[in-house]
Amino acid sequence: MANKNLIDGVTIRDLRLIPDERGRLMEILRADDKEFSKFGQVYVTTVYPGVVKAWHCHKLQDDNMTALNGMVKIVLFDDRADSPTRGAINEFFVGDHNHPLIHIPRYVWHGFKCISDHEAMIVNVVTECFDYAHPDEYRKPPHGSDIPYDWSRKDG
């Protein structure tokens, strides 16, 4: 998946889907991939049609995200003061018709919206375990925050 103006530190790698008469296999992240720095945990989250799960960022962990089924629009916003891409927004359409791995560095705000007519499933391989007592989770509302992004569908 080509994107000319990626946020600094974000990487996109097309995942290879290997089908045969038994089904499909898709490797998501290996210890020898350039996106891999360390293992924290793997989790799956789902989102219903039209729902937005945003905005959040982390100070300690990097995310490595893709959608397993359904279609989602994953959006990133760079608000890092020292970043050469400060103010940049990246949109990625991920799922049934496109399987990239999106590496999201810490401090980059991100979220997603289900754009398919059925529930979408996302897998995230993160570099830190979730700390229930002290979550590394910083949030802003999906609509009306200081992030200059409109989650509505862009017809035309």
Image (cartoon, rainbow, N blue to C red):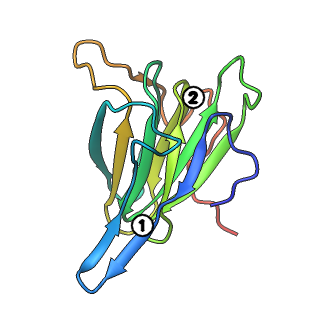
Compare marks 1 and 2 and give the one earlier in the sequence.
1
Q: What residue sits 47% from the left and 47% below the top? A: 112
From this view, report whether residue 47 is shown above or below residue 59.
below
Q: Position of residue 86 (x, y in %)?
A: 73, 28
| Residue 105 appears left or right of 65 | right
Q: Position of residue 7 (x, y in %)?
A: 68, 38
Would you say residue 152 is visible in this rendering?
A: no
The residue tagged 1 is 116
Quadrant position of the N terminus in the picture: bottom right
Residue furthest front in the image: 32
Nearest to the eye among marks 1 and 2: give it.
1
The residue tagged 2 is 145
Q: What residue sits 28% from the left and 26% below the top? A: 129
Camera-side residue: 15 or 111? Answer: 15
Residue furthest bottom in the image: 21
Camera-side residue: 139 or 57? Answer: 57
Q: Which mark is residue 103?
A: none
Does the CB distance between marks 1 and 2 fall below 8 Å?
no
Label 1, label 2: how far apart the Cα atoms are: 25 Å
| Residue 108 appears left or right of 129 | right
The quadrant where residue 60 appears: top left
Q: Callout 1: 10 Å neighbours few (<14), some, many (20+)?
A: some
| Residue 81 appears left or right of 106 | right
Q: What residue sits 51% from the left and 26% below the top? A: 106
The amino acid type, in three-letter code, at marker 1 is: Ser
Would you say residue 77 is visible in this rendering?
A: yes
Q: Secondary structure at mark 1?
A: loop
From this view, report whether residue 74 is shown above or below residue 86.
below
Q: Position of residue 150 (x, y in %)?
A: 61, 45
Q: Callout 2: 10 Å neighbours few (<14), some, many (20+)?
A: few
The quadrant where residue 81 appears: top right
The amino acid type, in three-letter code, at marker 2 is: Ser
